[in-house]
Amino acid sequence: MLRVDALRAIYPELSRCIVVTNMGAAPAELYSLGHQPGFFYLWHSMGLASSVGLGIALSRPELQVVVVDGDGSLLMNLGSLTTMARYRPANLIHLVFDNEVLLSVGRSFTTATATGSDLAAIAAASGVPRTGTCRTEEELRQAFSDALAARELACLVAKVEPQGPPSYFFDLHYMESRFQFERHLRQLAAPGEENREGDR
Ligand SMILES: Cc1ncc(C[n+]2csc(CCOP(=O)(O)OP(=O)(O)O)c2C)c(N)n1
Ligand SMILES: [Mg+2]
């Protein structure tokens, strides 16, 4: 399975969610399918998409949050799985694209998943209540819609080919994205809550 095809398979659902991505190839592919104001691409902060997504999910329980992560990124912040499991937000789906390499800096750097580490099993052992590994678009579509319907913390690992987008072109500056995303979250707030102290 190619990650761009996997993203395309669940794009209709993703477009209605708050989505926080890791950096590199995945955001470029998601962006190529169509930007949404609820999409935030975490440039230069490798490993932290899961932590940022967890924070949003906990502070905005009325919103469905999806973290789009990578194997290399999650492996450098494995503690986020135990923290997610500890707080268990029902509105968070952690979707990990496992291509077994650090693709965005050259596919020759393999990660520990290439030598047997199983991220879904690590998530389950951390206490994440719903986990699974998907190998086809149809499996992912089904697992993703089941996770949305279940309304419980999920970690879905999608095994994908180590192939990136033809272009990493992005005409949304990260500062523009940062303000647009914050404004969007604020607009989604309950009436009267938009200017809550401490939100800035
Ligand atoms: C702290 C930090 N270390 C390293 C990098 C360089 N870097 C950017 S993307 C990337 C690989 C990400 O791997 P993965 O999450 O598996 O996603 P993939 O590129 O395979 O899609 C690396 C090492 C960085 N940006 N920040
Ligand atoms: Mg990878």
Image (tube, helix red, strand yellow):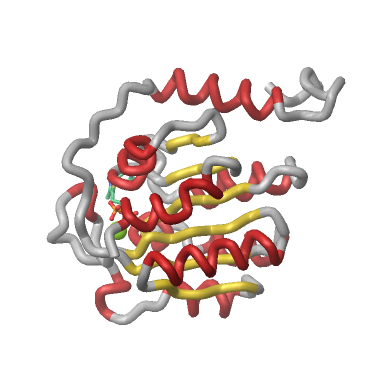
Q: Is residue 2 above or below residue 185?
A: below
The single residue placed furthest to the right in the displayed view is 192
Q: In which quarter of the image is the C terminus?
A: top right
Residue at 58% over, 46% down:
53
Residue 158 found in image quarter: bottom left
Give the residue displayed 66% in from the left and 48% down from the top.
Answer: 64
Q: What count of labels does the image hold?
A: 0
The spot of residue 169 in percent (x, y) is 24, 30
| Residue at the spot 22% in from the left edge and 50% down from the top edge | 164
- Residue 77, position as x, y percentages in the image: 46, 57
Left or right for 196, reference 81: right
Which quadrant of the figure shows ligand 2? bottom left
Side (left or right) of 83 relative to 156 = right
- The spot of residue 16 in percent (x, y) is 59, 41
Q: Nearer the viewer, residue 49 or 134?
A: 134
The residue nearer to you, when weighing 157 against 36, is 36
Residue depicted at x 43% and y 68%: 138
Whether residue 177 sits left or right of residue 151 in the image: it is left
